[in-house]
Amino acid sequence: MPPTIILRHRKENLKKCSLKGLEKNKDFLFYTYPKDTIIDLSNYFLLHMDGEPISEKDSDKGIFLIDSTWKYLDKILNVIPNNIEKRSIPKIYKTAYPRKQTLCSDPDFGLASIEALYIAYMLMKRDCSKILDNYYFKEEFLKINNFTS
């Protein structure tokens, strides 16, 4: 199974980063935008809100995740190959991550990167048991989405 690739904006606040702790896991490769060059993404899909919903049929592909604030997202998307498939998380899931600003007026809109990753792994039938280990809002996230820890 391909490792999950995470492209993190260089200005991402690592003290608040929900993905903190995954950097040491061999199943995750972290790159920094705009400094690093990303490897071949031909067997990957981009985790994106506008994509087709993730399903088990995607389980042989790698996940490519952009970790950034909404402010920098469009700039990063401009350097991503146009032909990469997009997959999304069903909109039934709620975030536990407190936000001061969002893409729209709904504070529950969108998920923290770690939450989206957890759900993607779950939908693809991958082991997601350790993904939330360092997530401060883990228990709240599991509770509001009716997951068991």
Image (spheres, rainbow, N blue to C red):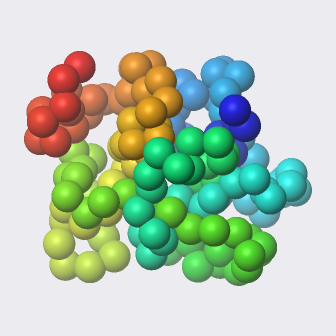
Drawn side of residue 24 relative to residue 58, left or right? right
Question: How many numbered circles are shown?
Answer: 0
Of all residues, the one furthest to the front in this rendering is 57
The percent coordinates of residue 31 (x first, y second) are: 75, 47
Query: Residue 101 sits in which quadrant?
Result: bottom left
Quadrant (top left, top right, bottom left, bottom right) of the N terminus: top right
> Which residue sits at x=57%, y=28%?
22
Drawn side of residue 139 relative to residue 47, left or right? left
> Which residue sits at x=47%, y=24%?
127
The percent coordinates of residue 40 (x first, y second) are: 86, 55
Q: Is residue 139 above or below residue 18?
A: above
Q: Is residue 71 above or below residue 108?
A: below
Quadrant (top left, top right, bottom left, bottom right) of the C terminus: top left
Drawn side of residue 64 relative to residue 55, left or right? right
Q: Is residue 41 above or below residue 78?
A: above
The percent coordinates of residue 57 (x first, y second) are: 53, 50
> Which residue sits at x=30%, y=60%?
90
Query: Residue 4 sits in which quadrant?
Result: top right
Q: Viewer-proximal residue, 98 or 87?
A: 87
Is residue 70 something that shows in the picture? no
Query: Residue 134 sits in which quadrant?
Result: top left
